[in-house]
Image (cartoon, grey):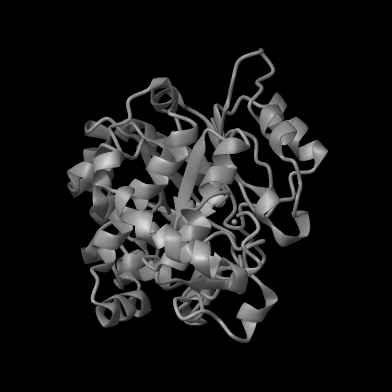
């Protein structure tokens, strides 16, 4: 996510022994189509629309102290990693942890959402055998373009990857059965990645269309277990012009509309982004950028300063909100003045902000 690098499934380690199952799974993939991903307007979606304060906590082992802090907090929703999919937590029963995350101190409930990277394989997951590090499968495409170690973009239309996500005891089933209310989906915008697009062209497929189909299949598999299973994709505001997607997802999220951090978390936030394309690269804009952010930019660690997020994503996010979706966003801002400005802008637009350091590893108190 430009943010997390530890994440995903059940026991797909014996890959050589899975060939028959994968081939069989490929035969039924066509059945998990748009026609089966019905419109979703259940009570969980209403709860999602009612969320005001939410927390994303990744790169975190969810020890008992952290879980107790979350449980005692006023957050209406929490997004965490399914730590049972990490290789060092193989076999861990996380259902009691999920239950604790969902309990509010007033006796009410809280939505617990699992992070899930559907566009990249992560080498610390239980599905990733050691042999892949030297002999990767053909559908694993190079290294992460953002420099996250251990993350590898995938040709996500390939049956073997989809079996890992969607097959019996796959990631989506595991997450749903553990009691999570839904998934927060990362690298959904993999179809914009140049290496992925080249591979899609070589395979004779449309990368964007294949991602749309994958989202439909995630919805089908999750809702087969929990009819209220929620889908929140991140950084894909351009999908709001796709009617079948608007009928399947429940919310949408965006990183860094106004503030970001830099590679290496130095600084971890408070770097203001250009608000319009006309501001990009101008002396007037750079005069507003703190020195620590400018140093990162000059060192090649802050390409984000070249992108005008607000002009591009806000109209699309507002269209999603008008279509009935909950709109979340993460701002990497820590200084009180920046936090207050983000909250003001966000609430004016009807969005749901979360403010934190770029690592997303620490528990922050609600910003408002």
Residue nearer the viewer, 298 or 155: 155
Please state if 270 lies on the left or on the right of 211 as rendered: right
User: Measured along the vertical axis of the image, is residue 275 above or below residue 133?
Assistant: above
Q: Is residue 199 above or below residue 53?
A: below
Q: Quick check: can you spot residue 310? A: no
Nearest the viewer among 262 and 12 is 12
> In the rendering, at what x and y percent does residue 230 appear?
44, 35
Q: How many labels sit on residues?
A: 0
In which quadrant will I find the C terminus? top right
Q: Quadrant of residue 65?
A: top right
Give residue 28's quadrant in the image: bottom left
What is the x, y in percent for residue 162? Answer: 44, 60
Give residue 272's position: percent from left, percent from top: 43, 58
Whether residue 242 appears in this view of the structure is yes
Nearer to us in this view, 114 or 32: 32
In this rendering, position of residue 126 left or right of residue 336: right
**Relative to residue 85, is residue 237 drawn left or right?**
left
Task: Kindly give the residue lying farthest to the top in the view shown.
Answer: 107
Extreme-bottom residue of the structure: 134
What is the x, y in percent for residue 182? 49, 38
Q: Tell me the residue at 72%/35% (across/down).
A: 97
At 57% from the left and 57% from the top, the residue drawn is 358
């Amino acid at each position: 996510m430009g943010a997390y690098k530890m994440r995903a499934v059940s026991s797909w380690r014996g890959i050589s022994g899975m060939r028959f199952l994968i081939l069989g799974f490929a035969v039924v993939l066509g059945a998990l189509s748009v026609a089966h991903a019905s419109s979703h307007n259940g009570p969980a979606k209403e709860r999602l629309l009612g969320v005001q304060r939410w927390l994303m906590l990744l790169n975190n082992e969810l020890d008992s102290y952290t879980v107790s802090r979350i449980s005692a907090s006023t957050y209406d929703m929490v997004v965490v990693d399914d730590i049972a999919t990490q290789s060092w937590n193989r076999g861990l029963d996380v259902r009691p942890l999920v239950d604790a995350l969902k309990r509010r101190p007033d006796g009410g409930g809280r939505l617990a959402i699992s992070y899930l990277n559907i566009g990249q394989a992560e080498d610390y997951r239980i599905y990733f055998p050691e042999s892949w590090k030297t002999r990767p499968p053909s559908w694993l495409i190079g290294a992460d373009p953002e420099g996250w170690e251990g993350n590898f973009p995938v040709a996500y239309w390939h049956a073997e990857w989809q079996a890992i996500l969607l097959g019996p005891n796959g990631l989506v089933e595991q997450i749903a059965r553990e009691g999570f209310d839904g998934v927060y989906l990362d690298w959904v915008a993999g179809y914009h990645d140049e290496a992925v697009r080249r591979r899609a062209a070589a395979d004779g497929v449309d990368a964007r269309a294949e991602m749309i189909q994958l989202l439909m299949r995630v919805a089908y598999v999750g809702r087969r277990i929990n009819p209220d299973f929620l889908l929140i994709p991140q950084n894909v505001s351009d999908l709001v012009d796709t009617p079948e997607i608007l009928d399947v997802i429940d919310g949408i999220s965006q990183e860094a509309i106004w503030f970001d951090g830099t590679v290496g978390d130095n600084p971890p936030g408070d770097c203001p982004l250009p608000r319009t394309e006309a501001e990009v690269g101008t002396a007037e804009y750079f005069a507003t950028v703190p020195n620590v952010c400018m140093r990162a930019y000059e060192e090649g660690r802050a390409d984000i300063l070249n992108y005008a997020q607000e002009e591009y994503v806000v109209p699309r996010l507002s269209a999603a909100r008008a279509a009935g979706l909950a709109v979340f966003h993460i701002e990497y801002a820590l200084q009180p003045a920046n936090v207050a400005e983000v909250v003001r802008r966000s609430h004016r637009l009807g969005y749901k902000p979360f403010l934190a350091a770029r690592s997303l590893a620490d528990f922050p108190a609600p910003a408002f």
